[in-house]
Amino acid sequence: AQKVTQAQTEISVVEKEDVTLDCVYETRDTTYYLFWYKQPPSGELVFLIRRNSFDEQNEISGRYSWNFQKSTSSFNFTITASQVVDSAVYFCALRVPGDYKLSFGAGTTVTVRA
Amino acid sequence: DGGITQSPKYLFRKEGQNVTLSCEQNLNHDAMYWYRQDPGQGLRLIYYSQIVNDFQKGDIAEGYSVSREKKESFPLTVTSAQKNPTAFYLCASSDDRGFSQPQHFGDGTRLSIL
């Protein structure tokens, strides 16, 4: 069975601070995909990034960056110079071959104060 | 614009009543999914469908039913057998050429008990 743990329930920062969201996963599969989604107050989940288990390159997209480390089974997400529009719930998820669902973590609520 | 449309946005159910949540997509995706989201928890899979006229139970299918008569549509019925239906329901779809494809989500339906 797959498991995703997001230990941080809520994070509150002041605008322009950096914030890092932790994600730890468990799976016996050697091939898998990891995802991050953002859920703003409107409710829709917005896909942010996908990473496969064989690609440990870190990635940067604008103010967002992701650090994937297989050795620690972690796929952490950093928002640099946070903005009020970054306020949302962020979910980490895992999918393995043959399993049609995404296994989600419980989510981390990020509040960015002006 | 391509996307997933869920309706209604808010729904109230009386005791003993069945209610149906609508989900329509124009992304030409083969696979569709229903998830349930409870406060402080990640999303849990209710049902999924890979092709028309076929669907499979997810982790929490009891008290729910679905149909998939058209590629674009995947309605979810919350039956009176579901004793705790109050939750946020999210529909998703994906181009399932492989497990690597991200799932794209609608805006959700919030269901409450009257």
Image (spheres, helix red, strand yellow):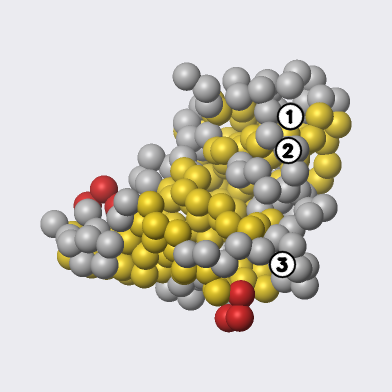
Crowding at dot 1, Cα within 10 Å, few <14 / some 14-19 / many 20+, comes out as: some
Q: Position of residue B71 (x, y in %)?
A: 73, 21
Callouts 3 and 2 on one subunit: no
**Residue underneath mark 1:** B30
Q: From this viewpoint, which residue is outermost toward the left?
A: A114
Q: Position of residue A38 (x, y in %)?
A: 43, 50
Q: Secondary structure under badge 1?
A: loop
Name the residue rendered at 43%, 48% in the picture. Answer: A39
Q: Quadrant of the N terminus of chain A?
A: bottom right
Q: Are marks 2 and 1 in contact (CB under 8 Å)?
A: yes
For the residues carrying marks 3 and 2, which lies nearer the camera in this image? 2
Crowding at dot 2, Cα within 10 Å, few <14 / some 14-19 / many 20+, comes out as: some
Give the camera-side residue of B69 and B25. Answer: B25
Q: Amino acid at mark 3?
A: Gln
Name the residue rendered at 47%, 31% in the picture. Answer: B9
Give the camera-side residue of B8 and A12. Answer: A12
Q: Secondary structure under badge 3?
A: loop
**Residue underneath mark 2:** B96
Q: Amino acid at mark 1?
A: Asp
Tell me, for residue A2, which label it has, or none: 3
How far apart are the two marked residues, 3 and 1, measured between alpha carbons?
A: 24 Å
Instruction: Give the mark, 2 or 1, whose residue is nearer the N terminus.
Output: 1
Parent chain of label 2: B
Name the residue rendered at 58%, 81% in the picture. Answer: A72
Q: Quadrant of the C terminus of chain A?
A: bottom left
Q: From this viewpoint, which residue is outermost toward the right?
A: B54
